[in-house]
Amino acid sequence: MELKGRCYCGDVAYEINGELQACFQCHCRECQYITGGNANTVMVFSQDNFKFTKGDPAIFARSDLDTPVNRYFCNKCGTAIGSISPSRPGSFIVKVGTLDNPEVFDPKFAIFTCDLQNFHHIPDKLESFDKRPPKKD
């Protein structure tokens, strides 16, 4: 899969050239903070297949956590690009809204529905999990 994306102002851009690892909605409370209230819609790729092609994104990681998520964003316009999470080592989690062609997003499941808000939408027949889905062998 070959994809490109950028922040709102265009100062930070990236490209992906590799296999999709996962595609989902996350409804956890942390993601609601990061998105401003909605579920986080993301696609996951190997870090080896993701690269920034323009700009130098800023990184935020909570200092009060032992294993924080590193969140990449444009320091000029504030657009959240994606993250690297200790729960998905070796992967880059891309925010779908930053893709040049976000219509490629086809979620396979929704997670952390225990934090679902009444204004969130989960498509009919989309597999949902109260927390994380069980790991596949």
Image: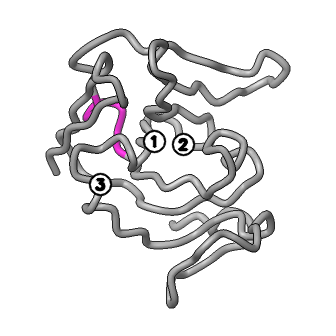
| Residue 96 within the magenta-colored segment of the rendering | no
Q: Is residue 14 above or below residue 24?
A: above
Which residue is drawn at the image coordinates 41% and 58% (left, top)? 22
Image side of residue 83 versus residue 65, left or right: left
Amino acid at the residue labelled 3: Pro
Circle nearer the viewer, 1 or 3: 3
Label 2, on which residue? 88
**Mark earlier in primary sequence (1, 3):** 1
- The region drawn magenta spans 45-50
The percent position of residue 44, horizontal first and vertical second, equals: 40, 48
Cα distance in 3D space between marks 3 and 2: 22 Å
For label 3, the residue is 102
Q: Mark 3: which secondary structure?
A: helix
Specify the quadrant of the image occupied by residue 34.
top right
Circle 2 sits in a helix, a strand or a loop, which is it?
A: loop
Q: CA distance from mark 2 to mark 1?
A: 9 Å
The numbered dot on residue 93 is 1
Q: Nearer the viewer, residue 71 or 74?
A: 74
For the residues labelled 2 and 1, say whether their Cβ atoms are less than 8 Å apart: yes
Amino acid type, callout 1 = Ile
Residue beneath the point at 34% across and 23% down: 9
